[in-house]
Image (cartoon, rainbow, N blue to C red):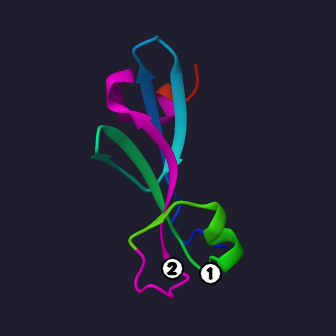
Amino acid sequence: MRIPIAPSHWHVRLNSGALAHIWALVYSEEGGDYLFESLAEDVSPEEQADLQMTGKVSPDSTTGMITVARLPTPTVHDIHTATAANCCP
């Protein structure tokens, strides 16, 4: 498997006060969850069986979006991209 586009670094502040660092190309809200996804190429059938793969080009394609994190929206306080100044506490 190959990740052809470098993912962004996201800070996700949870309602508990914890800070999650997530590397993903994009995020969206779907069905009460925040989904963080990255583009993947050359994903073997074996790897596809272990991953949640969405947005495939065709049913037999080895290219598509993979979910790298899923968080319930009620647990999230805020989401923003990380910068060099606020990268790591």
Q: Residue furthest right?
A: 46
Q: x, y percentage for residue 8? A: 47, 50
Q: Please report the residue visible at 42 percent of the width from the left and 22 percent of the height from the top.
A: 13
Residue 89 appears in which quarter of the rendering?
Answer: top right
Up the image or down, 71 lies above or below 88; here it is below
Query: Do tag 1 and tag 2 residues touch (Cβ < 8 Å)?
Result: yes
Real-space CA distance between mark 1 and mark 2, rounded to the nearest whole angstrom:
6 Å
The local secondary structure at tag 2 comes to loop
Q: Which residues are the magenta region?
A: 56-85
Up the image or down, 84 lies above or below 9; here it is above
Mark sitting earlier along the chain (1/2): 1
Rendered-image quadrant of the N terminus: bottom right
Label disc, if present, on residue 63 of the rendered structure: 2
**Around disc 1, counting alpha carbons within 10 Å, would you say few (fewer than 14), some (14 to 19), or many (20 or more)?**
some
Q: Is residue 81 left or right of residue 63?
A: left
Kindly tell me whether residue 80 is visible in this rendering: yes
Q: Residue furthest top?
A: 16
Q: 69 or 85, which lies in front?
A: 69
Up the image or down, 84 lies above or below 31; here it is above
The local secondary structure at tag 1 comes to loop
The stretch drawn in magenta includes residue 58: yes
Q: Is residue 88 left or right of residue 35?
A: right
Q: x, y percentage for residue 55? A: 38, 71
**Around disc 2, counting alpha carbons within 10 Å, would you say few (fewer than 14), some (14 to 19), or many (20 or more)?**
many
Q: Amino acid at mark 1?
A: Asp
Q: 4 or 72, which lies in front?
A: 72
Q: Please report the residue visible at 62 percent of the width from the left and 76 percent of the height from the top.
A: 43
Q: Amino acid at mark 2?
A: Thr
Label disc, if present, on residue 42 of the rendered structure: 1
Q: x, y percentage for residue 81? A: 39, 38
Label disc, if present, on residue 89 of the rendered structure: none
The stretch drawn in magenta includes residue 69: yes
